[in-house]
């Protein structure tokens, strides 16, 4: 499944427990699911080998707030280091060499090296099961977005070349969204396409 549903965006999630211990971990079960209100969902699944839950999920049960940081190419090696299963209470910001920046609306810190950071409040936690490998859907409302100015173009839109995001694939594989990987397919929004079905057969099968 993971080899065929790819590339997947990466949520680099910072959380905090009631004692103030930060946690930072990446999750590729992640996407945007609405813009009004802005809704992000990620899933810290139960571990496949022993059916335990991850520190991120445990923290969210105590403090239902998170920062979802996007991951660019410059961060990917350190992000991978942060995915190590360190003992609870270990600060992955320090282990992976990231800069923790105080958030404005939530208690967990932001990753200073990330080009876009979403401060979120957890709306709902939905377990998809209680067996090993089951997901825990974390439905987040976006409270504030921080965008680094150097990834914007002249129109103040995110420049897809400058942001240089990475995505997760199967196994140890990632994909870099640089110019060698991207191509353009114009959206058929100004007028509808006539459809393959109305083409003459000799053209349709050519």
Image (spheres, grey):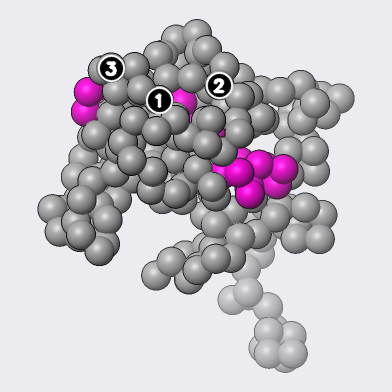
| Mark 1, residue position | 22
Instruction: Give the residue drawn at x 55%, y 50%.
Output: 80
- Residue named by callout 2: 100
Residue drawn 76% across and 21% down? 149
Query: Mark 1 to mark 2: distance in Å?
Result: 10 Å
Q: Is residue 14 visible?
A: yes
Mark 2 secondary-structure assignment: strand
User: What is the quadrant of residue 169 in the picture?
Assistant: bottom right
Q: Residue at x 55, y 57 (%)?
A: 168
| Residue 110 relative to residue 195: left or right | left
The residue at the point 26 percent across, 17 percent down is 18
Label 3 CA crowd tier, 10 Å (few <14, some 14–19, many 20+): few
Comparing 199 with 141, the one in front is 141
Q: Is residue 5 above or below residue 134?
A: below
Q: Residue furthest right?
A: 154
**Where does label 3 land, which residue?**
19
Does residue 23 sit above or below 161 in this rendering? above
Outermost residue, top side:
104
Within-10-Å neighbours for mark 2: few <14, some 14–19, many 20+: some
Between marks 3 and 1, how big is the CA–CA gap?
A: 9 Å
Disc 1 on helix, strand or loop? strand
Query: Where 179 sits versus 19, above or below?
Result: below
Residue 27, how many percent across, how many down?
A: 44, 46
What stretch of residues is rendered in magenta? 61-79
Residue 33 percent location from the top left of the image: 42, 39
Q: Of the two numbered discs 2 and 3 on the same chain, state the one appearing first in sequence.
A: 3
Q: Quadrant of the N terminus?
A: bottom left
**Is residue 129 located in the magenta-colored stretch of the structure?**
no
Query: Nearest the camera: 38 or 54?
Result: 54
- In the picture, the quarter occupied by the C terminus is bottom right
Disc on res. 57: none
Q: Position of residue 58 (x, y in %)?
A: 24, 34
């Amino acid at each position: 499944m993971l080899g065929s549903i790819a590339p997947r965006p990466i949520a680099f999630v910072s959380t905090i427990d009631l004692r103030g211990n930060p946690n930072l971990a990446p999750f590729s079960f992640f996407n945007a699911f609405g813009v009004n209100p802005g809704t992000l969902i990620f899933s810290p699944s139960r571990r496949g080998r022993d059916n335990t839950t991850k520190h991120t999920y445990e923290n969210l049960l105590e403090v239902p707030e998170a920062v979802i940081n996007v991951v660019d190419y410059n961060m990917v090696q350190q992000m991978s280091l942060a995915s190590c299963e360190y003992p609870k209470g270990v600060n992955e910001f320090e282990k992976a060499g990231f800069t923790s920046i105080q958030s404005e609306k939530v208690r967990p810190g932001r990753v200073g090296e990330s080009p876009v950071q979403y401060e979120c409040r957890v709306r709902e936690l939905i377990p998809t099961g209680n067996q090993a490998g089951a997901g825990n859907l974390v439905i987040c409302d976006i409270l504030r977005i921080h965008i680094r100015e150097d990834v914007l173009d002249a129109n103040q839109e995110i420049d897809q070349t400058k942001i240089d995001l990475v995505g997760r694939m199967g196994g140890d594989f990632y994909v870099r969204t640089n110019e060698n990987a991207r191509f353009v397919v114009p959206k058929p929004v100004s007028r509808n396409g006539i459809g393959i079905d109305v083409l003459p057969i000799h053209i349709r099968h050519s």
